């Protein structure tokens, strides 16, 4: 489903990654990083490359490692710089003619990982349509929709969103989080295969499921760690 139609051929994931690798330092400078240490610029470039790779995929093709790596690279920048990079990247996407709903889903999922609810405040979901939940679950079961974090492993509990109209942009949602949420104090790290499998087992055994997951639904979650 498109947020905005465009007849031009989208860049392949490899082309996008190469483009970001070649231009990320320039983008970083545009975000106000000129004059900072070269190591910081390199780290910023790495974060931008991971962001570019992440947004190519929709939630149906969600992969834990992609979102974890992007989260790790951004957290390594520190809160202030990471927020600048994430916001600048999302804002740049508003200037491009191509902007697909699945790209907004991926950035918003990452934002739900990186930010946390403030005490006595709302951490609202993004306005990107109605989510397709599994196992007869609903909004109350997944306060971080579309994400559920199990032992530091972020899974997508939504296969897709149905939308009639204009979706909220990732940039707008990131701005909301900057103003109303806290930076997540939990430090994410890449996980071993065993750690991801353990987290998956806990998710599949969760009492939140009101109906047994079908084999295809279980495979939807298993595929996220493969």
Image (cartoon, rainbow, N blue to C red):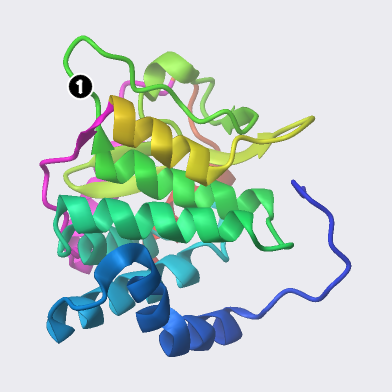
Judged left or right of residue 200, residue 174 is: right
- Whether residue 206 is visible to the viewer of this picture, yes or no, is no
Viewer-closest of 174 and 131: 174
Residue 216, given in percent of the width and then of the height, sits at 58, 47
- How many callouts does the rendering have? 1
Q: Is residue 207 one of those drawn in magenta? A: yes
Which residues lie in the magenta part? 181-209
* Residue 137, magenta (yes or no): no
Identify the residue position indicated by label 1 in the image. Answer: 118
Left or right: 5 as drawn, with respect to 223: right
Query: Which residue is the extreme one toward the top?
Result: 120
Label 1 environment density (alpha carbons within 10 Å; few <14, some 14–19, many ≥20): few
Q: Position of residue 203 (x, y in %)?
A: 31, 38
Residue shown at 61% from the left, 33% from the top: 128
User: At 71% across and 33% down in the image, what residue appears?
Assistant: 162
Q: Is residue 92 above or below residue 198?
A: below
């Amino acid at each position: 489903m498109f947020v905005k139609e465009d007849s031009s051929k989208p860049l392949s994931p490899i082309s996008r990654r190469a483009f970001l690798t070649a231009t990320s330092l320039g983008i970083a400078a545009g975000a106000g990083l000129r004059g900072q240490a070269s190591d910081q610029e390199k780290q910023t470039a790495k974060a931008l490359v991971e962001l570019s790779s992440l947004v190519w995929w929709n939630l149906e093709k969600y992969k834990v490692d992609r979102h974890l790596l992007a989260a790790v690279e951004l957290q390594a920048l520190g809160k202030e710089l990471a927020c600048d990079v994430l916001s600048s990247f999302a804002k740049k996407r508003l200037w491009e003619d191509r902007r697909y709903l699945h790209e907004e889903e991926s950035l918003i999922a990452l934002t739900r990982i990186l930010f946390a609810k403030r005490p006595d405040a709302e951490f609202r979901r993004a306005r990107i349509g109605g989510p397709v939940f599994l196992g007869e679950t609903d909004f109350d079961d997944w306060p971080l929709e579309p994400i559920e974090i199990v032992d530091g492993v972020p899974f997508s509990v939504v296969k897709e969103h149905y939308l009639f109209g204009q979706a909220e942009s990732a940039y707008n949602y990131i701005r909301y989080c900057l103003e109303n949420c806290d930076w997540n104090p939990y430090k994410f790290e890449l996980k071993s295969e065993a750690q991801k499998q353990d987290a998956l087992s806990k998710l599949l055994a969760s009492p939140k499921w009101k109906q047994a997951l079908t084999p295809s639904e279980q495979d939807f979650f298993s595929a996220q760690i493969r």
